[in-house]
Amino acid sequence: MSEILSASIYFGVTVSIVGYCLGLWVNSKFKWGILNPLLISIAFVILTLLVFNIDYESYNEGAKYLSYLLTPATVCLAVPLYLQLHLLKKYFVALSVGITTGVFSSLISVTLLSKIFQLTNEQLVTLLPKSITTAIGIGISEELGGIVTLTVSAIILTGVLGNIIAVGVCKLFKIKEPIAVGLAIGASSHVMGTSKALELGEIEGAMSSVSIVIAGLLTVLLAPVFANLAF
């Protein structure tokens, strides 16, 4: 059975889609933040590969085609941004300061923790793009000599965590302004966080989309600076 499944080019795509659909169903059934559809689909794929003794390379032969949808999916986030363009113009200074602060917070925290835990420069640059979308993060990691597979894992983990705890954190610190909520979620947990922001409201989703774009560009510019810090 494992040989038949691993030989099929449709296996990777099918198990990924089935896992995500299962995650959506479980999430809608129980309404628990920790039951994130992406987290459930990851667990489902891992369990399936273990049960049928299929290696990652065979699975990825089919699943890799889903990665091609990352870029157009990210571009589609421009739609809610366009609908709220008047807010972008009105609060331009506040948006710029907020997103820039979020990017610096991410890069500085990664750098400081890397020094505390005595990580190598390779490990540092691997983790620097953790809070931006995968399409941009992969490019930064490759350019700076990081471990791309671990970068992707860090980005996914950051996004899933942000998706799960974003609402709770905003409630804890009494952040109620839709613009502030959207900016915070987008700057810290990229596209996965933005999916949660879109659930909260149109303004939150649009502002989170703004954060993804600007945070990505700023990280491209600033990551090499932090990567060259003395270790």
Image: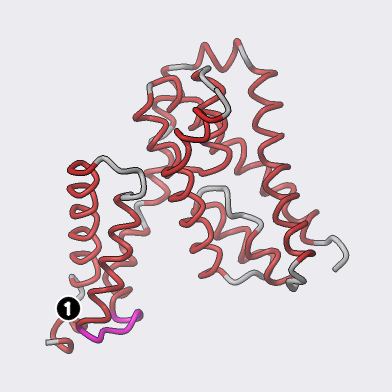
Q: Which residue is mark 1?
A: 8
Q: Position of residue 62 (x, y in %)?
A: 26, 71
Image point (42%, 31%), residue name: 197
Residue 45, compared with residue 39, is above or below; it is: below
Q: Position of residue 138 (x, y in %)?
A: 55, 60
Q: How busy is the neighbourhood of tag 1: few (under 14 within 10 Å), some, or many (20 plus)? A: few
Residue 182, compared with residue 94, is above or below; it is: below
Q: Is residue 56 magenta?
A: yes
Q: Amino acid at mark 1?
A: Ser
Q: Is residue 133 magenta?
A: no
Q: Which residues are magenta?
A: 52-58
Image point (66%, 57%), residue name: 128
Q: In the rendered view, how is the structure colored?
A: secondary structure
Q: Position of residue 157 (x, y in %)?
A: 48, 57
Residue 33, compared with residue 176, is above or below; it is: below
Image point (33%, 54%), residue name: 38
